[in-house]
């Protein structure tokens, strides 16, 4: 993320309907996956690529958490804004932890930011304990590529199989599937419109805005959007694998 985006992202991650719904999906899934309740049976958790730290604040309710952020400016921003989380400056490509250190290793929308995504997944698997879990989310489908991906410095978007193929021992995959399924048509149309506008602006990256700049966060529409997206939590936790979506989620056991 660019520097001017940090504060906007910090606020959005804690208040915007999209993040509130997404985080509900992720935390509910992790709770079910690890078979834990808040405040009980604490586990060791590694959260990689934490940005402004809100997912780490949520995961801290489930266990002892260590957070990693690579971008030095984002690291300093989050260290100042969220001083109560255990935050380490480091890279998913070279995690400075011993083998078999964590019960749960998470990277929520991270590996699309690194060129060698397979090495990133390999490092997550390395530091995961035997019997532990790795949970990854990524943006889906290159057909949704837009200025949103440019401002977030993405290398790629994924199909489900492309994500699961990054893991060693594919038979140990617990679950893989898409989410943000119901809003996919709206997102697809919005991305096509922003791509056209981007080309009309001469592909001027200085005019690029995040999706959050367009989607809004007030009133009835945001409540409806939150309800639609967050409803997918129950579908995912039931084991249903949605056929497509704006994002992919996968979990693997060691």
Image: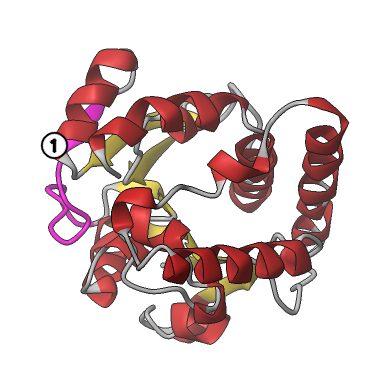
> How far from the left and from the top, in percent, is residue 66?
30, 34
Q: What span is colored magenta in the figure?
A: 86-99
Q: Is residue 212 left or right of residue 92?
A: right
In the image, residue 77 sits, relative to residue 102, either above or below, namely: above
Q: Quadrant of the C terminus?
A: bottom left
Of 77 and 129, nearer the camera is 77
Q: Which residue is mark 1?
A: 72
Tell me the residue at 35%/35% (across/down): 5
Q: Is residue 112 left or right of residue 27?
A: left
Magenta-drawn stretch, dominant element (helix, strand or loop): loop
In the image, residue 216 sits, relative to residue 237, either above or below, namely: above
Colour mode of the rendering: secondary structure
Q: Residues within 10 Å of mark 1 (few under 14, many from 20)?
A: few
Tell me the residue at 21%/74% (across/down): 116
Of 180 and 2, nearer the camera is 2
In the image, residue 160 sits, relative to residue 232, either above or below, namely: below
Number of callouts:
1
Q: Is residue 188 left or right of residue 151?
A: right
Tell me the residue at 75%/60% (across/down): 236
Query: Does residue 149 show up magenta in the picture?
Result: no
Q: Quadrant of residue 130?
A: bottom left
Tell me the residue at 47%/48% (across/down): 210
Query: Does residue 96 show up magenta in the picture?
Result: yes
Q: Of helix, strand and loop, which one carries label 1?
A: helix
> How far from the left and from the top, in percent, is residue 134?
44, 59
> How far from the left and from the top, in percent, is residue 83?
29, 13
Q: Quadrant of residue 24?
A: top right
> How far from the left and from the top, in percent, is residue 196?
54, 71
Q: Quadrant of the N terminus?
A: top left
Q: Is residue 152 visible?
A: no
Q: Is residue 68 visible?
A: yes
């Amino acid at each position: 993320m660019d520097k001017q985006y940090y504060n906007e992202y910090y606020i959005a991650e804690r208040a915007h309907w999209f993040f509130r719904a997404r985080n509900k999906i992720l935390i509910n899934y992790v709770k079910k996956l690890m078979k834990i309740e808040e405040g009980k049976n604490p586990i060791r958790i590694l959260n990689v690529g934490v940005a402004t730290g809100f997912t780490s604040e949520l995961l801290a309710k489930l266990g002892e958490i260590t957070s990693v952020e690579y971008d030095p400016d984002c690291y300093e921003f989050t260290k100042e804004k969220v001083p109560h989380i255990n935050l380490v400056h480091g890279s998913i490509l070279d995690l400075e932890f011993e083998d078999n250190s964590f019960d749960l290793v998470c990277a929520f929308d991270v590996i699309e930011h690194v060129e060698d995504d397979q090495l990133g997944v390999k490092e997550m698997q390395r530091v995961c304990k035997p019997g532990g879990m790795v949970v990854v989310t990524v943006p889906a489908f290159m057909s949704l590529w837009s200025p949103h991906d440019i401002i977030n410095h993405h290398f790629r978007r994924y199909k489900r199989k492309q994500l699961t193929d990054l893991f060693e021992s594919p038979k140990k995959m617990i679950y893989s599937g898409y989410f943000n399924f119901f809003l996919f048509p709206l997102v697809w149309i919005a991305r096509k419109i922003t791509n056209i506008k981007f080309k009309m602006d001469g592909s001027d990256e200085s005019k690029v805005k995040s999706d959050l700049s367009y989607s809004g966060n007030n009133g009835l529409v945001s409540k409806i959007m939150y309800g639609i997206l967050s409803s997918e939590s129950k579908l995912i936790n039931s084991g249903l694998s949605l056929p497509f979506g704006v994002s992919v989620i996968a979990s693997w056991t060691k």
